[in-house]
Amino acid sequence: MWSNVLYIDLETGEHHTRDRHDLFDKYLGGTGVATQLLLEECPPGIDALSPGNPIIFSIGPLTTIFPCVSKVVSMFKSPMTGELGESHAGGRLAMAMRFAGYDSIVIKGRAAKPTYLSIHDDEVKLKDATSIWNLSSVEVTGKILREVEPGKGRRSIMRIGKAGVNQVRYANVNVDTYRHFGRLGLGAVFGSKNLKAIVISGTEEVELPDMSAYKKMYSKLYEEVVDTEVMDKYHDLGTAANINVLNQLKGLPTKNLKQSHFENAESISGEYFADNLLLRKIACSNCPIGCIHIAMLKTPFQKGHEFEVSHISYDYELIYSLGTNLGITMGEDVLRLIDRCEQYGLDIMSTGGVLAWATEMYERDLITPPDTLGISLRWGDTDNYLKIIDRIVDMPNKFYKALAKGTAVAAAEYGGKEFALNLGRLEIAGYHTGPASIVGQIVGVRHSHLDNGGYSIDQKASSQQLNEEQMVDKLIYEDYWRMINNSLVCCLFARGVYGEQNMIDALECVGIKKTRDDLEAIGKEIFLAKYAFKEREGFDMDNISVPARFFETVSQLGMLKEDTVKNMLKLYRKKTGI
Amino acid sequence: MKSISVPYAKLNVKGGGVMPAKIKVANPNRCIGCYSCMLACSRANADSVSLIDSAIDIRTSGGIESGIGIIVCRSCIDPPCARACPTGALAPRNGGGVVLNKNLCDSCGVCADACLPRAIHFDRADMPVICIHCGVCARFCSHDVLEIRKTEVL
């Protein structure tokens, strides 16, 4: 239905749009189309931080048209893993792209000097970003661009902070202050291209073939989102509700997974945040849930009730990685750490993983004060962690340069590989739930717990007595079907609403007729196309080592065995044909 | 969560003329900035998916970290927009607010200037987008920011 791709060359300043219905007809949008664009645009074997690495953004056929279809997929070669980089963000970006009339944006080349992109409907401009290039805060960058750019009130502003400018490998791209393209280092790719920010807005209007059917379907989906319990979790405590739950089940990675429960979990739990720190909840565009939890942190700086006030968004993964995994005992301290990472534009899951590994290294005297420039690393020491974060971004010596490349690189250089908690060179998600979580992150096309929700399959394994093969079957089902969710691009929090039939019916409302089998086949095809890219860039499942720590700490399903993981990987390969 | 405060269908009087209801921003501080109300307005009244076709106007002021502005027609009994309209395209509506006759409108923009809350803006066809107080925005507000209230019909 829509298939407009905007191509921008940062080197020449040229841009043009092309109708790529060849891709959209076949792969729907989002991750499906972005994968094909990546295969087209990314030359084999290039350095992820070279000008040849493209940045691709894609929305899907239901974006903004149905509730909670509110995400954008970005794709690029990842400087973290050296292969497929894919990240999703919410905020207002998806809506801004829809109304600006672009279903995908492809950015190529490297600008000669610091630049930002200004995209408002048909007007696409490269603008000088020299004066904001070295700003240390992504929040201030947003404030400055708001003053000079049009589209006030409903535009979207993506930007990088100092971490992206300095090309920390796990730098993220901040979207509209509280959302991110996180994890695989899109911020570093922005930095390598001299690209500071992108502002986008639009005023298009969309008409559909059968408005009456559309209105009916919209109401049905809206009611499922708002009036049923499917999404209650995200609305109430948010994902932070997981802290207490996983803690009780012994599935909560703590102190670099030396433990799977945390004795101080209560004071950094979702309940604690909601009762003591939550300021308000806000929403991505076109989502009536409002799962973005914003906390208010008041820090006194002198007598007379003088406070610095920060508004900081939080989620489960952030509280795990900068909280339990570092032994931080108070919610307020977790917020201080989150805020520092946010201002720099660092991926928080990777930062937490790096800090946890470094703390254990320090504890074992495998790194010493000359490495850290005199800063000691101790569980729960928020002040020193803040100092370390500053240095990861500034990279004053060899040790901090290694930390800025992630745990896999740092451990290769300094040791401690057996407790450097990464899978496929990406720091792990906060679930020590069982083998499906580990296998799921290894096989997932972007090494993400969101690829197939392995943690949730572990939980089912516990209640339904699933064997290894049944767990693998469930992983594969999720891997294929989430390709469709991510091509549309629904928020995965709404995956309970966008099940098979609702996806089929919603697509029909926008003139796309697909059967269940069609969709599953497309999902599988997209999955294999991603693996084709991964393997082209050197991904080899046999080369992914699973840190021994996973098998030394009790999980939600008890002690895990390496053989279980190996066997599940073998089954996964056999069944998917990869 | 609760999606509706007043039965919407009963108040949706079609065909213009007397509409015994008006939209009210009952709880502005509850707004989460999702734009569901705007999308509902354009879907119901302009048969489009659009922000620019919506009579209700939600916008942030200073990014998402700052407050959210909610602009609706205040259903004036003596509407300055209608008074300012040089062609008679806007006529006062019984119970407050105005009714637009598109055939008489020449897109001069005087009405928008006359409305201090800036509840009138122009769509891509350069026609003023006028609230008909149908309440569809309130129906699709999940946080009870908006309510549709019965008015006393004069």
Image (cartoon, rainbow, N blue to C red):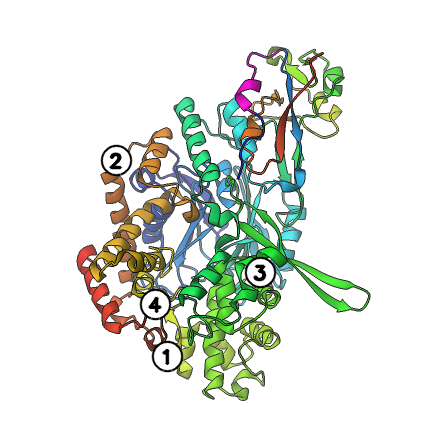
Distance from the alpha carbon under mark 2 to that under mark 3: 45 Å
Residue A272: mark in rendering: 3
The crowd level at tag 4 (other Cα within 10 Å; few <14, some 14-19, many 20+) is many
Q: Element type at marker 2? A: loop
Distance from the alpha carbon under mark 2 to that under mark 4: 35 Å
Give the residue at mark 2.
Answer: A515
Q: Is residue A114 magenta?
A: no
Q: Earlier in the sequence, mark 1 or mark 4?
A: 1
Residue A424: mark in rendering: 4
CB contact under 8 Å: marks 3 and 4: no
| Both labels 3 and 4 in a single chain | yes
**Amino acid type indicated by mark 3:** Tyr
* Residue B51 is at least partly visible in this image: no
* Chain containing the residue with disc 3: A
CB contact under 8 Å: marks 3 and 1: no
Q: Earlier in the sequence, mark 2 or mark 4?
A: 4
* Chain containing the residue with disc 1: A
The crowd level at tag 1 (other Cα within 10 Å; few <14, some 14-19, many 20+) is many
Viewer-nearest of labels 3 and 1?
3
* Chain containing the residue with disc 2: A
Q: Earlier in the sequence, mark 3 or mark 4?
A: 3
| Both labels 1 and 4 in a single chain | yes
Distance from the alpha carbon under mark 3 to that under mark 1: 34 Å
Give the residue at mark 1.
Answer: A417
Q: Earlier in the sequence, mark 1 or mark 2?
A: 1
Distance from the alpha carbon under mark 1 to that under mark 4: 13 Å
CB contact under 8 Å: marks 2 and 4: no
